[in-house]
Image (cartoon, helix red, strand yellow):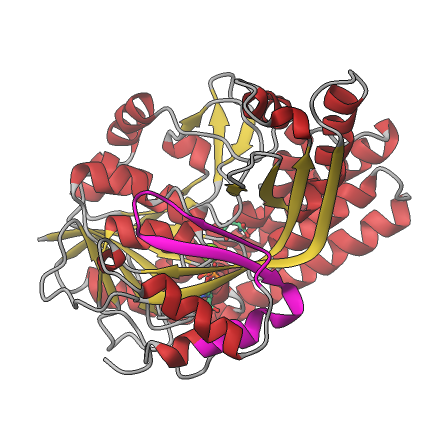
Amino acid sequence: MMKIVMKFGGTSVGTGENIRHVADLVAQYAKNECRIAVVVSALAGVTNSLIEIACKAKRSDAKQIEAFTEGLREKHLQAVSTAISSKAIQKEVAQIIEKTIFELEKVLTGIAYIGELTPKSRDYVASFGERLSAPIVWGAIKDHKLETQWFTGKEAGIVTDSNFGEANPLMNFTSHLIRERISPLLEKGIIPVVTGFIAANQDGIVTTVGRGGSDYTATILGVALQVDEVWIWTDVDGIMTTDPKLVPSARMLPQLSYQEAAEMAIFGAKAMHPRALGPVSKENIPVRIRNTANPENPGTLITKEPKNDSKEVVKAVAMIKDVAMLNVYGAGMVGAPGSYAKVFDVLGKNNINVMMVSTAVSEANISMIIKRDLLGRAISNLEIALLERGGFVTEVSAEDDVAVIAVMGAHMKGTLGVASRIFSTVAKKGINIRMIAQGSSELNISFVVKEKDGIAVVKAIHEEFKLDKA
Ligand code: ADP
Ligand code: ASP
Ligand code: MG
């Protein structure tokens, strides 16, 4: 009997109809000799709206908060009545929704009174999306006369550190708790439904594992339960050669290694949370990305060593938006040991992650890519720490209208001429490259262009390397 964790993303549970379809899929596999643990995301768009209201709540009045929670209540109750046919189950789930919405309203009112939003309270508000979706999915599965039980990530046993917004699971402790609480259900054929994205620290305070984190919840659960496969159900056929929303001729990649898939996730393929592959790759548990709207398609299979691996040098191309380029100049950096360390130290201490770095041989400047919303904080902190001290840095500048283009493929390693082919393709379009970086892993080459040119560059590279053809 096959054991599978099935994770359904926000797009797969966007409406009541979609949730009903998800429950049909689960039922079909459950009745076909599979033991299934389900992980669910919030309904599409809900987490964004929760984070937005949390940020606004500091300045909101009771009326605005009520209007928001009323809208959310309506949306979820509507989904309940479409997804579930039994009146008794509908009633049971609706009660959970009402209770949860009531709690959310109190939390938002509290934030408005205090006039302050901490990372801790932001995570707490963000957790409501999954707390509202999981009971509906649970009800829809129960509607199929299957035995099922729902849990928050915290109840399931996912324990993290206190890095709110991007918390890290304490894997050994978590595995122990999940095995204790969830395994016995699985053995009895009861289907556990667990909220993705949310967990708790050791004091029981709610944390989240980062945006898109339900994928991570799924692989954590997969490792703890030692399943045969983890399936990430989404709205596209699998991991593709590029975002099909940008290039409609994008092709599905049938097989990828953990390393390649992780590289793609880090560099913008939204199909997966970047850290999700960590736990499963250590234990060699295969992951499949599949389309809820096209379940006949086997999807992308991610394993350690893909069979029938294609030998193309370039496999995929991605664009990362919402980034900014930060430049630090100073003749004093030339040949001064430790000068780079000081720059990174300032950014690190301010919790600013550097996504890409490049320096010139003259060493008079460092260029870095960071998330765009962190730019203001990065510049001001660098200025305070380095300029004012009369140190080696003379200027800090930034460009906030850029995008990173990442070109990926495991076989780029040791293949001559890939970079020159990429750059001449961009040059032929008359587009200027602002910065270049290649990791020593040689799994990807990334470079920076103006954001307005991003899509044209992705299309040109997709075409040059004939990625739409197998
Ligand atoms: P979910 O709600 O299922 O978690 P996401 O929105 O997180 O879905 O991820 C799926 C989306 O990722 C797709 O709709 C697609 O537009 C986008 N995407 C970007 N790059 C890729 C890629 N290389 N392959 C597949 N999907 C991609
Ligand atoms: N709902 C969360 C988010 O939007 C987690 C997820 O969807 O994976 O980030
Ligand atoms: Mg996602």
Would residue 263 be found to the left or right of residue 387 on screen?
A: left
Residue 375: give x, y in percent of width and height: 71, 41
Residue at point 60% right, 66% down?
432
Q: Which of the image's four quarters has the C terminus? A: bottom left
- Range of the magenta residues? 433-460
For the residue pair 112 and 392, the one nearer the viewer reads as 392
Residue 82: give x, y in percent of width and height: 52, 71
Which of the 4 image quadrants contains residue 404? Answer: bottom right
Residue 455: give x, y in percent of width and height: 56, 73
User: Would residue 84 be visible to someone looking at this image?
Assistant: no
Residue 439 inside the magenta-drawn segment: yes
Residue at point 32% right, 80% down?
466
Would residue 345 be found to the left or right of residue 460 on screen?
A: right
Q: Is residue 420 positioned above or below 226 on the image?
A: below
Residue 140 inside the magenta-drawn segment: no
Would residue 415 be found to the left or right of residue 109 on screen?
A: left
User: Would residue 400 be visible to someone looking at this image?
Assistant: yes
For the residue pair 82 and 39, the one nearer the viewer reads as 39
